[in-house]
Amino acid sequence: MEPDLLKQLPNAPSWAIYTGQFGRFLIFFSIVLFILSIVLSALQGKSPKLARFASISFFGGALSILGTMGCLVTLFVTNQFEFQYVFSHGDILTSLSYKIAGVWTAQQGSFLLWACTSAIFGMLAFRSSGIYRRWYVVSFSLFLACLCGILAYDTPFELMKGLNLNGVTKILHSGAGMTPALQNYWVIIHPPTIFMGFGSLTVMFALSVAAMLTGNVTDWIKIVRPWALLSASILGLGLCMGGMWAYETQGWGGFWAWDPVENVSFVPWLFTIALIHGVIVQVTKKRWIGTNLILGGLPFLTFIYGTFLTRSGLLDKVSNHSFAEMDRSSLILLVVFLVAVSAAFFVIFGVRGRVLARQSISEEDAPGIDREGMYRAGALLISLMATGIAMGMSWPWWSALRSGVGSAIEEKQYHLVIVWFFIPILIFMGIAPFVSWRKMGSKEIFNRLVSVLSVTAGLTGFALVAIQNPTIGVHLLPGATVAMPFHFHMMLMPWMAILIFVCVFTAIANIWRVVETFKRSKLGIGGFVAHVGIAVLMSGLIISRGFEQKDGNVVIPNGGPTKILGYTITYKELQQKSISDRDGKVIFSVEGPDGQHFDATPGLYYYQGDDGAPTAMVWPFVMKYFAHDFYMAMNKPEMFAWQKPLDFKEGQSRTIKSDLDEDPTDPGMIVTYKKFVMNGQPGQAGTSFGAQLHINDRGREYDVMPTLKIAEGEPEHDLPQVGQSYRMAMLSMDPADKSVKLQLLFSPPLYPIILFYKPMTILVWIGTGIMTLGGLIAAFARRRVVSG
């Protein structure tokens, strides 16, 4: 920045500079403490007194990470835009909650959030680690030291370059702000929730490693059980929140698209679920010892691998999610950690874990069906499904290595594979609660399930009839089919009936067991409640997607009403203070098929793109009813009459044709830039710049002056009307040579609309709540083991 402009900026407060330096110091201090904790723990075999100092170092490092987060939050809340990270992801206009959320909207902050949540869980689980504490601390400290190493290389406390004048750091008036796609209330609650889930994965990994190195592979299972349950609950909730966020903002009408970044979180959750059921078997039957040691580490290792995929830049062009590519040194450190820790984990298992597991094997199986066999089949299916999804999310990397261009697996391909696992898993979830740990015959199991099957058949039939009720409004296209494996197509209605039957069966079977179990153990119902939640959640996803209706059209503001899916849609107004107003909305009047009237208000505002032109940011409008959602997605309005902005020098005239005009004889529009106008002083808020223009639009002449005003946050634009069809925008200017960049806009613009009729999405929300509640009840029921 030029010295003259720097002089006009205020000095950065010294306390803020010190806060940034202190935050950076805490990162390095954490690394030192974690390394010290590792060394002291390793040496405590020779001197048990060192264990106390190792623990103090571990807690000191963990608390230092939390202090680092406190420093960064302080800089965001107090608008310290002299720091590059704060400038890039914060601005002065956003509310306090969004200022705080800006901390974790990019790489450095999200890694710091991951380190914080891991440190919190590391401290919480420390007390219960017992005889495994030594190697638990070593494993946890090694991981946290690695995260801090990444933050040391790629720090969020870097001062902006070019803001130093004679040894004094200056501060900018505002920042660039949060990425437009993230400006939604979910950014406040979803990342902290799901990162709590990610942080909890380290507890299971550390305890698994500690069990193998300690030589006791039995007692760790009761310690890890409540933490695995809590991890699955929080991570599962975070996954569902992510789906809800996508549903309310992405505009494609769904919750889940098998995006590679979504799968990075889903795979560890699946392995955690497999571990939970393996833990039950080991506690009850003294089996699965080696399997559980592996399952204890896989959720953590697969998430580290997923982090490598998302931060390596390999998924940028195949994912709906955007992640900045890591600093090269940081990425190398992450890869080294991933390879070294994965290799060490499996070597330890091969040398220690497998041998110890063989020594603890109990009696052999007797013929018959028991709950262990059901759990074995279910855990195997879940693990195979997780492996298949992990292969799918890795495909962009593998294909990029092979051909140089990454490609993602399509959603329909996932469905063709997942169906082989999904239906059997749901069936096992319904049958297993009725199978005892002793061997049973198939006839005895069937007799226990007769009542459940009868209720399921009745409720499924009722549901299928109710879904086709005009009140719910599901109307299947005649002959609608769904793609099945081996290029087979099945009629949609029978397939939906099968899926709904399986979900209802799982829900009813587990509700049945909830009622039976509650009488003798109120806290013993957690697992069954979680199963009910999963069944309800899946039924909501299946019904809302399988029976959805979708259609689109273009709404022309002065062209009368438009019919879509039986709804009559009429443009009313564009409600925004300026084109950069983040609360801007397009108001449409909607008349439903039943005569109901309401206003639909999809969001719309513009931000300055990389080319200087206004870039539209849109998000859908969702009207939630009990039986369905009215979902209106608005594509970016057709507003640019010129394909790209044009540069003008003072006194220049140019003849321009609209990009939509195909008439070769059309004379076009003649734009003359007559004079540059400035009111105020350069660089000061409130100063406005204008361009006096004379426009000849095919014989109709207009004199207009678009202006650009310096304001806190993004510049304010005044867009004068040019006839009945256009507005003129001045996107940028150069006071030195008085050149301007202009763009002609349609006024009013054209609004492409897509409507979705989404039946029974309420089940997704209800199922999420039930699943989370069940998991928390189960974790709470096992807390006595931890506190004891």
Image: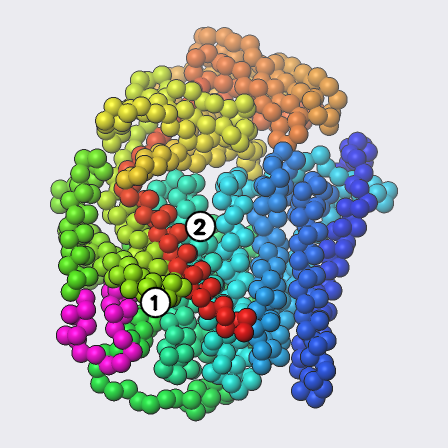
Q: Can you identify the residue that label 1 sits on?
A: 520
- Callout 1 amino acid: Arg
Nearest the viewer among 529 and 19 is: 529
Find out whether residue 306 is within the magenta segment: no
Nearest the viewer among 648 and 725 is: 725
Q: Position of residue 74 (x, y in %)?
A: 70, 46
Q: Residue furthest right?
A: 166
Q: Can you identify the residue that label 2 sits on?
A: 242
Give the main secondary structure of the magenta stretch. helix
Quarter residue 291 falls in: bottom left
In this view, 669 is above or below 105: above
What range of the chain is rendered magenta? 420-449
- Marks 1 and 2, Cα distance to the nearest angstrom? 37 Å
Q: Position of residue 388 (x, y in %)?
A: 35, 66
SS assignment at label 2: helix
Q: Residue at the spot x=53%, y=15% of the render?
A: 720
In this view, 480 is above or below 470: below
